[in-house]
Image (cartoon, grey):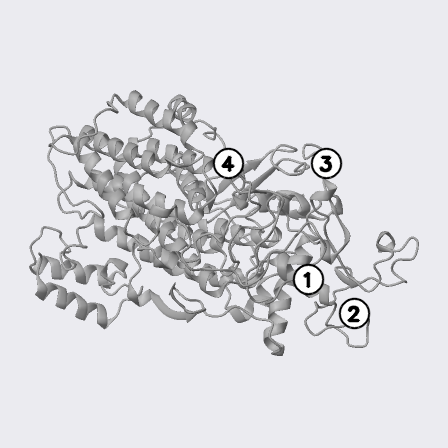
Amino acid sequence: MRPLEHQSAAVRRDLAEQLGIEHSVARMWSELLLDSIRRDFARPTIHSRNLYHTSAAMWDAWAAFEPGTDQVFHNETMIADDVQLAREEAISYAMYRILRHRFALSPAAIEMYPEYDMLMGELGYDISITDTAGDTPAALGNRIAESVIQFGLTDGSNEQLDYANLYYEPINPPLLPDFPGNPDMLDPNRWQPLALEFFVDQSGNPIPTGYPDFLSPEWGEVTPFAMDQDDVQIKQRDGFTWQIWHDPGDPPYINGEPAEDLRYKWGYEVVVTWSSHLDPATGTMIDISPATFGNAPLPLIAEETDFYDKLNGGDWGEGYDVNPSTGLPYEPQMVPLGDYARVLAEFWADGPDSETPPGHWFSVLHYVTDHPEHNGQFMGQGPVLDPLEYDVKSYLALGGGMHDSAISAWSVKGYYDYPRPVSSIRYMCDRGQCSDPNMPSFHPEGINLIPDYIEVVTTETTAPGERHAHLAGSEGKIAVKAWKGPDFINDPDTDVAGVGWILADNWWPYQRPSFVSPPFAGYVSGHSVFSRAAAEIMSMLTGSEYFPGGMGEFEAPMNEFLVFEDGPSMDITLQWAKYADASDQTSLSRIWGGIHPPADDLPGRYMGLDIGPEAFTEARRYYNGLKSCPADFMPDSTLNFYDVSGFIVRYLAGDLLADMNGDLHLDAMDVMDFLNSYSDGCP
């Protein structure tokens, strides 16, 4: 996934041309959007919305010249002598205006505005044309942009006030991670902000006030793409009404109930034990090829203790016998566990200069469409689409899915307001251990002891030559074998913090000292929702669960890839057979990175499992003109026997386009809904 990676979209365009890869105008603008996101503040909710709104704008411009389709934000048709050129022009003016509007106050503006101008110039378009009147493609593009911009001012995002929160307030005082422990946490079941001397967000932008507010806790109020009222629940908390989309229910709480306490503690203990893997010097070697990793069926939530390997890391996936594309076994790739875990945590963390998790999957989409074995057939069948049609269709589906994923995940984050590992681990370890009331430092809300991973510091263990000798004077405290943290890194180009015994009240996730954890609640994992939804969309879009050629890859060069410490210690290539394997790897990376416990992960995957097909099917309704006339399965704006036949064929084939009520199941209710829509006729 590296040949076309470069900080400049213009250079990437030249590289693509040199490699003989034909990129559509939509792809060129998508690349500029991703570059803009990389240079903006790390705001996955806002950028999911940007990805969706720009994708819908490009679709609306393309569909204006395509009879039998529906549009999302701007309903207008147009004719042209050269339809392809007209589409490219309308798309370009729409994207130019929207990007300049959405990134006007962004740190990206100073670099990206000239890039927008440059692309318009390369395409031969006059940026001074701002008129919305007239029958030119440029005017159409400007009208589409205006429709999108005006919609964005009324969609519940609070764009007018720079997306500021209206009523959310944290109930816990901030954690000061540079100081030991977590003495001020009032409720271990609620999110806790962090107080730092200065904060640098995941895109590398400094926040001088020390830490931003909770990002988008009220995002459940934003207008979705495919979700409807059957997907939302209304609940009350702290005197406010919350809309929760695809509500997964409560996470585990520490509340005195033995089963609840056990699950709460178990999850954070997994985070601690996996932190002990973040050092290549441990000598543990593993095969990270698809021969061993991947192919992990999703467990029930009740099976999570079997699904995750608490001590050794990873899940119950057993890999694949052969590559279905070549018919040959996958070649093993033996690497240090410490390198794999660190590369995984950083690659999927979407850190400095990244396009955030939803944009990351647009990069995966681009990787797939650039692959020599990608053939451009929609859903893997039928005629090969020209690149522009394939791109605008894939962007609408993926953009809509990422937008709905953000709304769902952040509606859950805002309502459940669940803590991050750095808060909970320090909170529990401040209290002590809960394994044995006859041992020192017992407390019911303490952490479970695990020999060689989580222990009580004693006079015996601090004796000279013993494992806790360097912790002498801290007897009675909890020690963990974990990544030692940023204090052990002076020069990130040469230093490795390594793993060792540290006091738990100094435990740190695998993150920079100026970041620590994302500025929003943990439950559910946004990465898990985004990635599973995207994997479902990619599988449906391409007609295959597998990456082209049976394997997707990303190269992490030795001593060059990691950012805040040196590494990896050898060249590593992340590999995935299926899109779902990449999604699963994303979720596991957040545990190794110390950002999420398992309780945040699986519910998010299940949410994405529904959101992806919902969004893809909704996009197909726009492609086929079924939004304006749900029973017009031909489509020709006339209902007759052929539409009935078309519905029956899709229904019997198990095609979700026949899912009239949007519940992802085909049954008698869909037949009844079709008949009702048929009797209503077309508008």
Q: Are marks 3 and 4 in contact (CB under 8 Å)?
A: no
Q: First in sequence: mark 3 or mark 2? A: 2
Find disc 3 in the rendering and name its residue: 490
Residue at the disc numbered 1: 183
Task: Tell us which disc is closer to us: 4 or 2.
Answer: 2
**Residue at position x 28%, y 61% from top?**
654
**Residue 186 pos. (x, y %):** 61, 66
Q: Nearer the viewer, mark 4 or mark 1?
A: 1
Q: Which element carries disc 4, helix, strand or loop? A: loop
Name the residue located 55 percent from the left edge and 53 percent from the top edge.
319
Residues at discs 4 and 2 in contact (Cβ within 8 Å)? no
Q: Disc 3 versus disc 4: distance between alpha carbons?
A: 22 Å
Q: Nearer the viewer, residue 629 or 162?
A: 162
> Tag 3's secondary structure?
loop
Which label sits in the foreground, 1 or 2? Answer: 1
Relative to 651, 279 lies left or right: right
Say which quarter of the image contains residue 311: bottom right
User: What's the residue type where badge 2 is placed?
Assistant: Ser
Seen as rendered, the residue at the extreme right is: 464
According to the picture, the residue beneath numbered tag 4 turns out to be 353
Q: Quadrant of residue 681?
A: bottom left
* Left or right: where 456 falls relative to 491: right
Residue 365, x across and y down, in percent = 40, 41
Instruction: State how far apart marks 4 and 2 are (Cα).
Output: 44 Å
Residue linked to disc 2: 441
Q: Position of residue 633 (x, y in %)?
A: 15, 56
Closer to the camera, 229 or 556? 229
State which tag comes first along the sequence, 3 or 1.
1
Q: Say above or below: 446 vs 580.
A: below
Q: Amino acid at mark 1?
A: Pro
Tag 4: amino acid: Asp
First in sequence: mark 4 vs mark 2: 4
